[in-house]
Image (cartoon, rainbow, N blue to C red):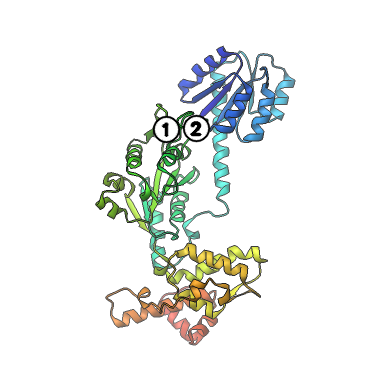
Amino acid sequence: MDTILIVDDEKNYLVVLESLLGPEGYEILTTVDGHNALRLVDEADLDLVITDMKMPGMNGMELLEKCKRIKPELPVIMMTAYGTIEMAVEAMKKHAYDYIKKPFENEQLKLTVRKALENHRLIKENRLLNEALSDRFRYGNIIGKSKPMLKIYEIVRKVAQSKASVLIAGPSGTGKELIAKAIHYEGPRKDRPFVSINCGALTETLLESELFGHEKGAFTGAVAMRKGRFELADKGTLFLDEVGEMSPSLQVKLLRVLQEMEFERVGGTKSIKVDVRILSASNRNIKEDVAQGTFRKDLFYRLNVIQIDAPPLRERVDDIPLLVKHFIEKYREDDGGGKIELTPEVWKVIYKYSWPGNVRELENVIERAVVLNSGGKIRLEDLPEELTEAEAAFDVERFIPPDVPLTKALEQIEEKLIRRALAQSDNVQAHAAKMLGITKSLIQHKMKKYNIAV
């Protein structure tokens, strides 16, 4: 619901404009004072300001200038009964959206308001898209070519085009939010907002306010109306991270919203309808929570129409070289941009380590190593102690599935070793062969056998 602030020292005009625009579906705030209007611009979530030009205290032109300093994107429509061409030109130079003379034609005013709000909506959407340009969140930019990741890419392609709710399960640090963003940006809502919230990071009261918004005076500190994440995500996607941490009472309210796509702000009575796709994630086993009675079964079914399991890093060892290369490229610019390589000893440690913190932990380790490296070489001393002191033996169970014949198991291990060596050597076959202790012709033969393309 778009919110319009109307500022005019003549109360009869406030009544006229509210009765004219309120039935159009807008939320109307009014004030007779420019200073109070400026406070609302700063504190409330507004989509448009309509202000009279001549007012005592702070006039409309001053209000326009100060509005633009606080929120440059917020459109302001100027009104006056004493209009001149010079005043109109000055208002437009100061970035007013439009200039209307009193008395105005009702339909013309409605049209101007609609255009201003649509323009504001487009500006906000473009800003959100521009913020995402540095990382497009396509599934092709989620790093990994292992079989678990290829399976996820296939699911993302399918579910992105639907409106179905998706629950992304997996341990912390496995990239669940990246998967959610891939679903959003591959789907028909890609030009609409992607809004996220961590349900485990806020108290119950704050989370309710963040999700549904609140009215002025709804609680101590609610000095102005605030829109919640559901409103901000209208026509787009809302990502509920760590949804398993939500309290039982808030689960009830969320279920109602998912059923009706309608809610009231905290402290409000007006129903607000939205069109939002829900994606959620949890590092908990919510099925177990349902069995224990701590998570509502009906809400779980609403959220879990489709489930995607984000694999821990120990189950996608083949992706480690690709991830390491990606993180080196990401952080080496801060280190001068030169080539950086890992010594064989470092690679050995990286493969032996179990990575309980998953991809997030690997990224942290590589960022640290890039900062500490000398001469373009990452050595053992550049790694955290927990890695170098780890004495875990090579875990062959990570490489092969259970219950396979010996010949098949050996072939799977051989294929994985070849793929890993090629990834580590930037697909230079001679270097990969040397790492494996075999000839270039033999690795080429094996690549044909396992249909490995570079």
Find numbered disc 2 in the image and state the secondary structure of the residue it sits on. loop
Q: Position of residue 238 (x, y in %)?
A: 43, 44
Task: Classify 271 as above or below 127.
Answer: above
Q: Which residue is disc 1 drawn over?
A: 266
Q: Position of residue 389 (x, y in %)?
A: 48, 76
Amino acid at dot 1: Val
Q: Is residue 359 left or right of residue 92?
A: left
Label 1: few (<14), some (14–19) or many (≥20) C-alpha neighbours in 10 Å: many
Residue 13 image-quadrant placement: top right
Q: Is residue 133 left or right of residue 361?
A: right
Question: 311 or 365: which is nearer to us?
Answer: 365
Q: Is residue 419 visible?
A: no
Question: 215 or 157: which is nearer to us?
Answer: 215
Residue 155 image-quadrant placement: bottom left
Find numbered disc 1 in the image and state the secondary structure of the residue it sits on. loop
> Separation of disc 1 and disc 2 at Cα?
10 Å
User: What residue occupies the far right of the structure in this picture?
Assistant: 86
Q: Is residue 53 visible?
A: yes
Residue at position x 43%, y 60% in the image: 174
Q: Name the mark nearer the viewer: 1 or 2.
A: 2
Q: Which residue is disc 2 drawn over?
A: 222
Task: Classify 122 as above or below 131.
Answer: above
